[in-house]
Image (cartoon, helix red, strand yellow):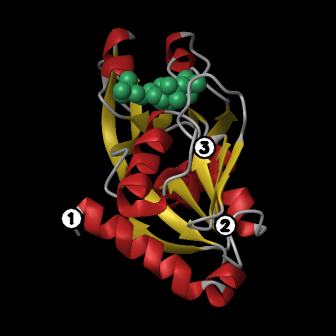
Amino acid sequence: MSEFINIALPKGRLGKEVYKAFEAAGYGCNDVLSPDTRKLIFENEENGMRYFWVKPSDVAIYVERGAADIGICGKDILLEYSPDVYELYDLGLGKCRLAVAAKKGFRDRKDYTLRVATKFPSVAMDFYSKKGRDIDIIKLNGSIELAPILNLSDVIVDIVETGTTLKENDLEAIETIVPVSARLIANKAAFTFKKEKINEVINGIKNINGK
Ligand code: PRP
């Protein structure tokens, strides 16, 4: 085997699910899912696959800069950071949505600057500028749902999956911005030089996925 395909997997449930699809397609590698190791990088010389676990929000950085040839990344991250990569395949996994949410009963009066707490400032800015609405972005890194409860913001722009976090904090979704799912992305140069192998791997995954 001359050359490896380097794959950035997002740490967590989605990454494990995606890796299982790679494995089922014949592109597995020992110990990738082993719970007993803190190792981050795994390779299989026989099928030329090299996997590494990265923070989900960092996958696109590894791929854009060519440290990974391909990676698995949520559409939310692609919309927020617009990395210069090819988006090749919608895996249909990790489905959720980016939405605006607020305290139950919230009504936007539109005569003041709306305070928006979010991990996705670019998505939020784009969404409200298309509506011609002035907003004040409050960039947070997690537990976004706290912001309207503590009157740090009027609304939030965040991921909603099951809706449980909103419900348990007496918030409600007001508007969906965009549906989100996991995408397979590729480094542009790698897709030129390793096109055949990358397409072979993607087709294997598509067969497992049934589309
Ligand atoms: C995400 C998101 C919401 C929650 C939505 O948070 O930011 O808080 O999941 O999921 P649900 O609709 O199924 O409840 P995450 O767990 O990534 O943690 P965070 O608060 O650190 O962003």
Three-letter residue code for mark 2: Pro
Three-letter residue code for mark 3: Pro
Q: Looking at the image, which is closer to me, 11 or 26?
A: 26
Q: Looking at the image, which is closer to me, 13 or 114?
A: 13
Q: Look at the picture and state if 112 lies above or below 2.
A: above
Three-letter residue code for mark 1: Gly
Circle 1 SS class: loop
Label 3 or label 2, whichever comes before in sequence order:
3
Give the foreground label among 1 and 2.
1
Mark pair 1, 2: CA separation? 28 Å
Circle 3 SS class: helix
Label 1 or label 2, whichever comes before in sequence order:
2
Q: Residues within 10 Å of mark 2 (few under 14, many from 20)?
A: some
Q: Look at the picture and state if 118 lies above or below 46.
A: above
The residue that label 2 is drawn on is 83
Give the foreground label among 3 and 1.
1
Cβ(mark 1) to ligand 1 < 8 Å?
Answer: no
Asked whether the beta carbons under mark 3 and mark 1 sit within 8 Å of each other, the answer is: no
Return the x and y of residue 113 as percentages of the image width and height: 58, 38
